[in-house]
Image: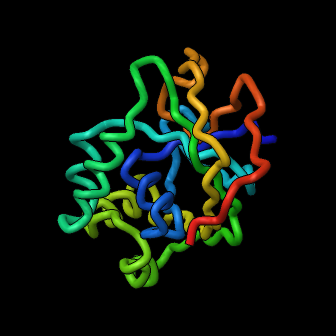
Amino acid sequence: MLNIAFKEWAAICEALACGRQRLILRKGGIHEEGGNFRPEHARFWLYPTHFHEQQQAGIKLGEHAILETAEANRPPAGFVRMSHFVDVTSVDYLQDLDELLKLDAEHIWSEATVRQRFAYRTPGLYVLRVNVFRAAEVIEIPEEPDYAGCKTWVPLKMELPTVGAKGVA
């Protein structure tokens, strides 16, 4: 059972779900303490967010089919669809842009997005390497007011089952 979710673009969640991506890059949400991300949890549900225009401009041109799949899997208004969770295997904070850019083949963000996130406020980005798991069944939960806003971590109102999940290859 697990009740922590991590907000991320739906396209990135889809890339993780289909095995195209095995890492998450993160700077921090506006509503996080000090505006800084902290890798507080080693296991969490992926909470897809749907800001189509931002995601379309923020991912590589050759990856737009993933965005289309993410949009097709969008739940009805007022609900969040939980289908995948991750275990974090390592966390690094990269302050060297060249080292970060060497990870290009491991994610779908555009170079411009990586550069922008890296340079925001102070140079650097967290790199979370993850193992992704598909839940035994997809769970739709009501989108609570507490879940809203630009924050990374969302404590869910209920524990969601992880038993029977399968690793994504």
Residue beneath the point at 60% across and 70% down: 129
Q: Is residue 50 left or right of residue 30?
A: left
Q: Quadrant of residue 45?
A: top right
Q: Is residue 34 visible?
A: no
From the viewer's perspective, is residue 84 above or below residue 115? Answer: above
| Quadrant placement of the N terminus | top right
- Residue 126 locus on image (x, y percent): 56, 64
| Quadrant placement of the C terminus | bottom right
- Residue 21 locus on image (x, y percent): 46, 68
- Residue 100 locus on image (x, y percent): 44, 77
- Residue 122 locus on image (x, y percent): 46, 59
Q: Is residue 93 left or right of residue 11?
A: right
Residue beneath the point at 49% across and 61% down: 16
Q: How is the image coloured?
A: rainbow
Front residue of this view, candidates 120 and 49? 49
Residue beneath the point at 42% across and 60% down: 15
Residue beneath the point at 45% across and 65% down: 123
User: How many marks can you see?
Assistant: 0
Front residue of this view, candidates 82 and 110? 82
Q: Is residue 146 visible?
A: yes
